[in-house]
Structure formats: structure tokens, C-alpha cells
Amino acid sequence: MARVVVDVMLKPEILDPQGQAVQRALPRLGFDGIADVRQGKRFELQVEGPVDDAALARINELAETFLANTVIEDFVVKVEEEK
Amino acid sequence: MARVVVDVMLKPEILDPQGQAVQRALPRLGFDGIADVRQGKRFELQVEGPVDDAALARINELAETFLANTVIEDFVVKVEEEK
Amino acid sequence: MSLDTVEHAAETPDTEQPWKELGLKEDEYARIREILGRRPTGAELAMYSVMWSEHCSYKSSKVHLKQFGEKVPANDAMLVGIGENAGVVDVGQGYAVTFKVESHNHPSYIEPYQGAATGVGGIVRDILAMGARPVAVVDPLRFGAADHPDTRRVLPGVVAGIGGYGNCLGLPNIGGEVVFDACYQGNPLVNAGCIGVMKHEDIHLAQASGPGNKVILYGARTGGDGIGGVSVLASETFESTGPAKRPAVQVGDPFQEKLLIECTLEIFKEKLVAGIQDLGGAGLSCATSELASAGSGGMRVELDTVPLRDSSLSPEEILMSESQERMCAIVEPQHVDRFLEICEKWDVIATVIGEVTEGSQLEIFWHGEQIVDVPPRSVAHEGPTYHRPFARPSWQDALQADDAGRLARPANGAELREQVLKLVGSPNQASKSWITDQYDRFVQGNTVLAMPEDAGMVRIDEESNLGVAMATDGNGRYAKLDPYTGAQLALAESYRNVAATGAKPLAISDCLNFGSPEDPDVMWQFAEATRGLADGCLELGTPVTGGNVSLYNQTGETAIHPTPVVAVLGVIDDVTRRTPVAFAEEGQLLYLLGDTHEEFGGSAWSEVVHQHLGGLPPKVDLGREKLLGEILISASRDGMIDAAHDLSDGGLIQAVTESCLRGGKGARLVVPDSLDAFTFLFSESAGRAVVSVPRSEELRFNDMCGARGLPVTRIGVVDGDEIEVQGEFAIPLSELRTAHEGTLKDLFA
Amino acid sequence: MTTRIGVVTFPGTLDDQDALRAVRVAGAEPVSLWHRDKDLHQVDAVVLAGGFSYGDYLRAGAISRFSPVMETLIEQARAGLPVLGICNGFQILTEAHLLPGAMLRNNHLHFICRDQKLRVENAGTAWTSDYTAGQEISVPLKNMDGRYTADERTLDELEAEGRVAFRYLDGNPNGSLRDIAGITNAAGNVVGLMPHPEHAVEPLIGTGRTDGLGFFTSIIKKLVNA
Ligand SMILES: Nc1ncnc2c1ncn2[C@@H]1O[C@H](COP(=O)(O)OP(=O)(O)O)[C@@H](O)[C@H]1O
Ligand SMILES: [Mg+2]
């Protein structure tokens, strides 16, 4: 079975309060040199059968219509090697 | 500036209701052939200066003590090529 | 990219400007040129276009809204009236209460979660800007058909957004409405209300006076949110270097808003502000022009000092940005340091962006060059006024003639029973707990009553037990049949709900949701509804303290039902005397207050059983509503009743079912001689309530009603674990509970 | 000498005023503590109140756990200072590893607000001595991330040592493992639970019950008798 990963991130121009809160906490924790933090979602899908173009097209559609809210989010679909 | 990504996923033995909810919705949306869905978090960090071993070690520590709660979560740190 | 300065605008009168794309009419653009004596700069055009929009200027509605200021009942508790961020009423003991309802309909259709969340955020800042601590929120909602697939997208998102924002903010949600109707399919209504409390001396107004005083912007950084339309300007007038498409959707940060609230309250406590305004629609354009306009007029702003989230924003975009969680304060110079210190304490970014000046112009600079030089009143308060044509729709008579009285009625007890179960389990009449359990109703530790009570009630003074109550109501079906009466019925129901808890209704706010004002049918509905509401408020003695209008709620040619939502605020001297809805004491007597007629037009029964909408809505008798209210309040204060529930949609059987389920006790009902069982159970005559009276109080209660001339009928007793209508049918509570409480869960969980 | 009980306010804490009120209603002196201040101002016990500190961003309690006040609190809690974590406070205590396990999103993925029945399993902690073991109480529950989770070994250990302090009755509201609503550390001074006893200390307000008052009277008695 193959693993397909869908990364969903807020569009760059959209406010990301979570990422901001994390970033603001960093100096307090003694971490500096990190200019920006954005927080998004990662979906790991276990796909039955071959991950061919047709399967990827379907997963793209799934990401576009369901996993991501394209009004405010962008997404990337990647096939991962199974370890 | 380089981008470092930290992926945080619930440990495999921990119930992931968000992933499950996604998976359960799939048939309704007309998608099948996906055996499992897990949902995690993705952090994109913009790092100032070079991402050398020292910087990576610090980010690993950040992930271990802060970005992930290792009681329930695993994490992976990756350096991404800037596009 | 060259900057369109005031000087440049004066020199280039013939430059083409995208006024049309920004939604201005030709004559409006001409008027702007006339006011300024030249063409506007890009920044000025942006300001005028958004401030003169329907949303900000109320240009179609204000000729009708005027009545709320004219037909003001005497002897009112109003401290601050319409025109400010929110009205303020005196509730005694030195306390003042401010409250308001606003719509966030269109954004919630596009992005349900964020649209609803930022709706809550916006109304809370309005209340805060008056100087008050927000103490509770309410959320009247309307969705398309319950079983429509898109409702599955919109409803869970809206509910999660309202909960996500309100819960994180620490404001108890104490009431609201959920109504389903196909007419709201492409136009859900997401109205949100907030109540705030302060001492009289703490009332703050949105005005900038005192030359030399500083203008401080504080809260979130400004980003490219909600400026979709204005990007046209950046890209067409100039060669924009920023992202081509700015988002029309705003994302809320309730955590930031919580900090903003605490920080602002601490600033109020130290009396550090001379004027204050929240940033909502039209962002800085609105805040600066309104503050200046309400003050002496002069203000100078250095726009490049505004802290940005996105450095590529153009000055026009900064002026227009609707980034959430921001406030603007006018502060005397000697208080600035302390002001900034308090902001720092709460991790809130605060920046001096300008000052109040001697002059009468609002002047805005960008990198040292002047890009705005306008009389602020012309932007904020002197927008266009339309006298839109209106006429009674051609279909209105036929609709009213289609009498619900002719619909087939249940023929026997078995059919009645079946229809009762169908009614109480229909989406509109079903329990809303699947939704309301997602809202924190306990936070702040002052909630006396919350869902599913008739009105929400919060204690505002721990020593004296002074409290306030609020209910919101609106019935679009009634208003469609007759908008004048429909608006009065919304008012009457909300008034009745508040009185049923034992609180005295004081004043109202409203949210008027209608279709396109360019349609004379819709404008007629609007004119009728506002007239009905204004007349009703005059008669009931409850002034309109403020509200909100949402127009263009329509899909293509089809408008939503006219939906005036009314929020009534009441006060109760001692919250320990409040009356809940639950029938909890076995053996207590049930009395029906008021008169029941055969009134089924627009009723829940006609909808659920016959999918019918026609005829006339129930008649309104506001004198009777007032009397009923007085009786309910006296009875509660004097301990004559243990429970009360107003009768509204669904009629008596709906109210009795809710009260029985809430108390976990059954009831035996007897149909009064003067009525048939069907009318008794399903009629929606207004001005009624059902109460539970301890036997020891029966005489006293009857005497009081008799002495004051309110019809009262003994209809049964609290008893057992079923609802029995004698001679007709009985339904076990468990069966009613399954029908009533399962519906929304089955649809949306 | 009156007992002084501190309540910490983090940015985004919501139920601090309620907790202070509950302390007062129970008869102790409430003391407000500020997240940036390391000083605990000689309080005899501390309540970490509910809410959404730092918006619950990252994970509930994850950012607050690193506040200055927590440095002192963690040290003193280990030395025996009584600490009660309610809801977000419980989440902070697990993030700070003063209590084992972690809190995850409710299994139904919704915020839930309801009156919740609980059984007091351990009446021997600093915060529960006014209850009897097995006693059933009802207090409001309201949270998004209330599903208690720990590995099997930890759970078995908690059970064996009687450190499951409260269990949900009449239906598990969030998928918490073994119906756990609250736990205690081995010494019994640090207790955390998801439901809100501070919302149930006055008749009429909230659910109209006073079942939560015992938490506050328990600690006062313990401190007075100490
Ligand atoms: N969206 C909502 N938010 C909060 N409370 C709600 C909401 N919808 C309904 N409620 C509450 O549920 C109860 C029943 O609602 P409803 O049947 O509309 O009341 P009524 O008919 O008395 O106006 C009321 O307490 C009302 O405030
Ligand atoms: Mg009611």
C-alpha cells in the first residue's frame, strides 16, 4: 500500500494566528533566529492499489474539494516512499 | 532564508478522530480505495542564517520540547529547498 | 509606481478612475468631485466608495429607519440612542447596559466558519467600544432546508465558528434561534448579538476631540483581509506590486480579541481615552472618518506607521483592510505612555498613528506625501440617501387569500397524536441542543438562564442580584404574509419571552434581513416592517436603541422571506426570582394565559403537515402583550408561579412538550370547552403563555389575573411520565424526547 | 490567619474570575497571580483555571506551560504545594509533566458544554477530602480537548495507585480512556480534571448546583489543619 501525503497550508496572505502564537513564544523558550512560523495540516492517506495518474488525479480532487478549503488554503499532494 | 519543515503526527497507537472523520466521509463523497487517513500538523519555519548541523540540532530540540508533545506525538524535521 | 497624491489629483483632473468597479454610481462620483473641488485621489476614492456603500451608509434604508428616532416612547431608559456604536440603557443601581445585533450573512455563506466567527468578533468590539464589559452573546441563525446538502456545509461551519470564537473569548452564549427554510438556501442569515455592562460614568463615545490628542491604533497587525474589491483600485490605477488577488475572507483570532478586551477594559478603568472606536467594516477609513466627524473634524494620520502583516499593501488597501481585532483610541498626550504600557502588559501591539488637529479636514499621509484631504463628515455621515421606490407586491393579495384555515385537519385522536410527534420532531421545532451544546453558557459564572429557556439571563451584580435578560425572535413566514404584522409579532414574541422569565422588557435592538432594495416588492416589505416595528415599540414602550440592516439577501431574482429579527433586553431586580420553563413539580396546575383563536396562517403546523404558506399571520394586540408581560413579571416576583413558557410557533403543544421534557415530568391536559382539540394544541395566537402554579398559589394567581382582566384557563396538571390530552391521545415522554431531540443530531452529527 | 489561594491568569484564561469567586465563596482569600510574575506571593495553594490560554494554539496548555509563573509553580508543586488544574489548567499540568498523560481533541470533534455527572474515586487528595469515595456529583463540563490519553502502562499504574480521581458517569463525553475525568499525582497535592467545579458553587447560577464547592472547602480544611 502506498502513502500519499497532502499538505494543507493557509494561503500566505491569510492570517495564521496559530503560527503567530508559536513564533511569539520562541524567544521566551530561548530560540531565536526564526523569522516566521506558519502552521498547517498534514494528511497521510494509505492508498489501496497503485498510485497511478488516475489515482493521483482523484486525490487531487479530494484535496481540492474536501481536505483543503481553497477559499483560504493551498495544498500540495505528494507520494511518499513507504519505509 | 531557508525553510525548515517539522511534521508532527499522532503516534500510531493513538486514536485520531480527525483522520477517522475524514476517512468516514470519503465514501459519501464518492472516494474509495483509501484504507486509512491520519491527520497531523505541519510547521513551516523560516530560519535566518545557515541551516547547519547546529541549527538543525536546535530545531530538533524545539520540536521535541515544544512543537510536539512526545507523550502522544512523533515528529520529523526536514530542510526544504526554497523555490 | 507613482503615488496618487492630493497634489497630483488636482493636477490631473481627467485621469480615469474605477469608480464603477468600486460600486459607486455616476452621480455619486460626481458628488465626490464636487465636495472635494477636484477628482479624488485613489485613497480618497477608496474611502468614499466603501463608506458610501449600502453596508456602511444605509443609503436605501435610512429614510425608513428614521422612524425609530421619531416614534420614541416617552419615559424610556435610553442613555445613548441610535447613531453610536450601540445604544445604551439605564438598568438601575448605577448600571448601564449596551446591546446590539448585527449580521454577517454573506461572509458566512462563502466561508461559514470564519464568516460566523468574525461576526461574533465584530459585534463584541462594538459593545466594547461603548465602554462596556461584554457579558454575553446570542446568535439568531437561518439556514436553507435542513436536508439540503449545502446546509450540511453551512450549518456545522457556522455553529463551529460561533462557538470557536465565542467560547475562546470567554463570553457565555445565552440564546438565539435556528430556523430552516428553503428561502435561505443561498443566503443563510448569521446574526450575532452581544450585551455589555458598565457604570453610567463609564460610557464612552466614538469621537475625536481635543487638538493635540493622539490617535492610537491597537490590536492585530493590518493585513490584506476583506479588501477584495478595493484591490481593483490598486491594480487599475497603479501598477500594483502586491499580490494580485487579495482575500475577501477574514480570519478571526479570538485569542487576540480576548487580549483586546482585557486590555481595553484596563485602559477604561484608568480613564485613559477621550474617544474610542472599533474597526469593523471599512477598517481604518471608517474609524478615522467617524471619529473625526463626530469630534471637531480635524485629524492627521501617518499611514506608514500602521503595523502591517504584509508589507506589500498599498495605502488604499491599508485604509480599506478589514483585518479583525483592531481598535482605535483618541488619547491625551499625557496618557499615551500609560496607554502603551497597558497594551504591552497584554501583549497587544499599539502605535500612535496620528493626532487630532485644529482644522476641519481628515488628512492622511504616506511617506510624507498627502494622499487624503477630505471633510470627514462627507465621508462618514453625509453619504447618499435614496428614496427607493416601493409598492405592495402584485402577489401579496393572492398569498393572503390562500387561507390556512381550509387545510385538512386531523380527524381524530390518533391523527392528532401523529401530527404532534411530526411537529415537535420537525427541524424547526426540534430541540436545538445539538447546536447549543457546542456553546459555553457557563463561563464568567453569572449565567442564571440559558438555552433552552425562553430568554437568556445573566447576573450583573453579585451583591444585589440585579440581572438582565435577552431574547431574540423573528418569523420570516409571518413577515412574508404581512411584513407590518410580522415585524410586530417578532417584537411581541421577543418581549413575551423576556417577560416569561420574570424580567421587565426595557428596550430593543434589531437586525433587519431583507432582499434587494432595488426590488420595489422588497422595499415595500422593508418599509412595512420598519413601520410596524416603530409603531409597535412606541406602543410597548420599548425604544429601539440601534440595530443593523442586511440587504441583498437573495439568489437571483428570489429574495429571502423578509426577516426582521428583534432582540428585547429586560431587567430583573433579583435574579433569584427568575422563572424557568421546566415543569418540575408534580401536581402543579397548568394555566393558559390569553385568548386562543383559529389562527394557522404561517403556522408551524401548516408548514410541517401541509408544506403550506398562505393566509394571514396571527393578529397582534400589543396592549394584551403588555398586560400578559406585567402578569408574568408580578407572578414571578411574588412567587405565584414556578414555571412559565411563552406560546409561539408550534402553539400550545410545542410549549408544553418543551417544558415537560425540560422538567422530566409529564402533563395531563384537558381541552377547554370553548375550543376544539386541534385549535387548542396547534393555534399560534399571539399574547399567550402557559404557567405552572403551585396549588397553594392558585387562588391568589386567579384573583390577580381576574382583577387585571387577563383571560386565564385551567388546562391541566403536571403529572406522570407522558403527555395526555384527555379523550384524544397520550404520548410517553420518552417517545417525545426521541422525536424532539434526535432530529438535528441525525441530520448534522 | 486566612488561607490564601492563588489563581493564575494567563493570556486567554477565561475562568479565573469564577475560580477567584469560588475561593471566596468557600471562605478563603483569593489572590490573583499573573503569568509573567515568577512570585507566587506566599499563597498556600494555586488554582490553574479554565479557558483558552494562548488560544489553545499549538496544543491546549502547550504555550502557557513555559510561562515564568510556571517555573516557580512546577518547582513548588514538586515540593508539595497544592495545585488544582481545571480544564485548561489540567491541560497545562499535563504539558508541564506534573501529571502524566495528555489531552486530545474530543472524539466527536465538537466543543461540548453540558452538566456532567462524575464519581469521586479518590477522596484522599488535598482537593477532595470533603467528598467520600464513590460519591456522585454533577458539575458543568465544557471543552474541545478533553479526551484524556496515556499509554496502557501509565493507565494501569494510575488505577493501581488509586490516582484516577474522577470518572465520568452516564456516558463518556469525549472518548477519555477508562472514562477518566481527572487524576492526581502520587503525593495527592496536584490534581487535574476537565469538568468545572468552580462553576458549581452557587445555587441558581449555572446548573444551580453547588456540588463543586467541596474542592475548595477541602483544601481550606487541609491548610487550616496543617
Ligand atoms: N443559535 C442558537 N444559539 C443559542 N441558543 C439558541 C439558538 N437557537 C435556539 N436557541 C435557544 O433554544 C431555545 C429554543 O429556541 P426557540 O424555540 O427559538 O425559542 P422560542 O420559540 O421561545 O423563541 C431558546 O432558549 C433559544 O434561545
Ligand atoms: Mg420562548
Image (spheres, coloured by chain):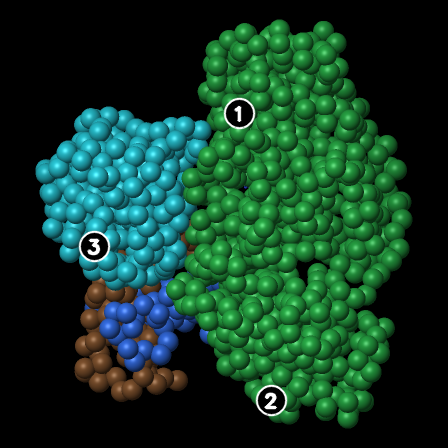
Chain colours: A blue, B brown, C green, D cyan
Say which element carries label 3.
helix
Residue that mark 1 sits on: C577
**Corner quadrant of residue C698:** top right
Could you classify mark 2 by the number of other residues whose Cα lies within 10 Å: few (under 14), some (14-19), or many (20 or more)?
Answer: few
Seen in the picture, residue C215 relative to C369 is either above or below; the reply is: above
Could you classify mark 3 by the number of other residues whose Cα lies within 10 Å: few (under 14), some (14-19), or many (20 or more)?
Answer: many
Pointer 1 with pointer 3, Cβ within 8 A: no
In three-dimensional space, the C-alpha distance between marks 2 and 1, rounded to whole angstroms, equals 63 Å
Q: Which mark is residue C368?
A: 2
- Position of C277 with respect to C597 (left or right) is left
What x and y, as percent, mark residue C575? 52, 30
Q: Which mark is residue A38?
A: none
Of C25 and B73, which appears nearest the observer? C25
Seen in the picture, residue D122 relative to B53 is either above or below; the reply is: above
What x and y, as percent, mark residue C488? 76, 36
Seen in the picture, residue C508 relative to D134 is either above or below; the reply is: below
In three-dimensional space, the C-alpha distance between marks 2 and 3, rounded to whole angstroms, equals 51 Å
Q: Residue at x 72, y 23 (%)?
A: C627
- Position of C415 with respect to B75 (left or right) is right
In three-dimensional space, the C-alpha distance between marks 1 and 3, rounded to whole angstroms, equals 43 Å
Q: Residue at x 72, y 91 (%)?
A: C8
Chain for mark 2? C
- Position of C391 with respect to C93 (left or right) is right
Callout 3, which amino acid? Answer: Leu
**Corner quadrant of residue C726:** top right
Residue that mark 3 sits on: D73
Say which element carries label 2.
loop
Callout 1, which amino acid? Answer: Arg
Say which element carries label 1.
helix
Please tell me if label 1 and label 3 are on a single chain. no
